[in-house]
Amino acid sequence: MESYTRYERARIIGARALQISMGAPLLINTTKVEPLEIALEEFEQNVIPITVKRT
């Protein structure tokens, strides 16, 4: 897994949690219900399709 700064990590998880709360399909099987918890689990499993472009 790529090394992210704490700001990048927060932005990725927050963006994914927003997507989930708006009805996006889940990328993992989980028993969690809260979008933020699901996004955290997806991040830990490295399945979120969001990349960071650094200049």
Image: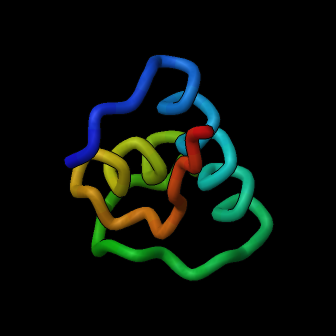
- Colour convention of the picture: rainbow
Which residue is situated farthest in the bottom direction here? 25
Instruction: Indicate whether 20 appears above or below 9.
Output: below
Instruction: Tell me the quadrant of the picture where the C terminus can be found.
Output: top right
Relative side of 43 to 23, left or right: left
| Image location of residue 20, percent across then percent down | 64, 63
The residue depicted at 36 percent of the width and 49 percent of the height is 43
Q: Nearer the viewer, residue 46 or 3?
A: 3
Q: Nearer the viewer, residue 33 or 38?
A: 38
Q: Which of 6 and 13 is in front in this view?
A: 6
| Image location of residue 51, percent across then percent down | 51, 57
The residue depicted at 22 percent of the width and 56 percent of the height is 45
Q: Quadrant of residue 19?
A: bottom right
The residue depicted at 54 percent of the width and 31 percent of the height is 8
Which residue is situated farthest in the top direction here? 6
| Image location of residue 25, percent across then percent down | 57, 81
| Image location of residue 53, percent across then percent down | 58, 49
Which residue is situated farthest in the right direction here? 22
The residue depicted at 40 percent of the width and 42 percent of the height is 40
Count numbered badges in the picture.
Answer: 0
Instruction: Indicate whether 38 appears above or below 13.
Output: below
